[in-house]
Amino acid sequence: MGARPSADPLIDPIAQLREWAPKIYHMHGKDASVDMEAVRRYGVFGAVDFAPQRTPGFGDLNWRDIFSILHEKGYEGDICVEGYHDLIHHGAWEMTGQLHAFQYLKWARGGSFVPNPWDQA
């Protein structure tokens, strides 16, 4: 993956999620690391990729907030981890990154589901 000009003008994904969550029926999980130094030097339409894609858990997104919003808005679907985009965890490291993403996302949503024993009669 070479450098590419990014068309993502630093839109806040959390604000977008709050607005659109009730209409979401399927999600792909991906992340990014924003290089603010590159933004300051070249702008958002510069000659460098200021937000390289990352596997969830390696980027800047706060996935705990994402899960809270999704839960609050009633989302019950899955999140398909988007792999094969991470600049660091690719090739021989792809499955390491994928497993980390799975474990990280599981942690971010609150861990494994444990039914409330008082709800079981």
Image (spheres, rainbow, N blue to C red):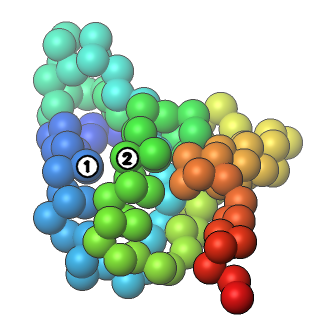
In the picture, measured across the screen, residue 92 lies left or right of residue 94, that is right
In the picture, measured across the screen, residue 71 lies left or right of residue 92, that is left
Q: Label for residue 45? A: none
Q: Position of residue 3 (x, y in %)?
A: 41, 33
In the picture shown, does residue 76 fall above or below 72?
below
Q: Give the residue drawn at x 64%, y 47%.
A: 107
In the picture shown, does residue 8 fall above or below 119?
above
Q: Give the residue drawn at x 55%, y 75%.
A: 78
In the picture, measured across the screen, residue 42 lies left or right of residue 111, that is left
Query: Which amino acid, by three-letter code, is at mark 1?
Result: Ile
Q: Position of residue 58 (x, y in %)?
A: 57, 34
Q: Quadrant of residue 49?
A: top left
Q: Position of residue 26 (x, y in %)?
A: 43, 79
Q: Give the residue drawn at x 20%, y 43%.
A: 12
Residue linked to disc 2: 65
Q: Residue furthest bottom?
A: 121
* Labelled pair 1, 2 in contact (Cβ < 8 Å): yes
First of labels 1, 2 by sequence position: 1
Q: Quadrant of residue 25?
A: bottom left
Element marked by disc 1? helix
Residue linked to disc 1: 14
Circle 1 Cα neighbour tier, 10 Å, few/some/many (<14 / 14–19 / ≥20): some
**Foreground disc of the pair 1, 2:** 2
Question: For this rendering, which residue is in front, 15 or 49?
Answer: 15
- Disc 1 to disc 2, how far (Cα)? 8 Å
Question: For this rendering, which residue is in front, 62 or 111?
Answer: 111
Is residue 7 among the parts visible in the rendering?
Answer: no
Quadrant containing the C terminus in the rendered view: bottom right
Is residue 75 among the parts visible in the rendering?
Answer: yes
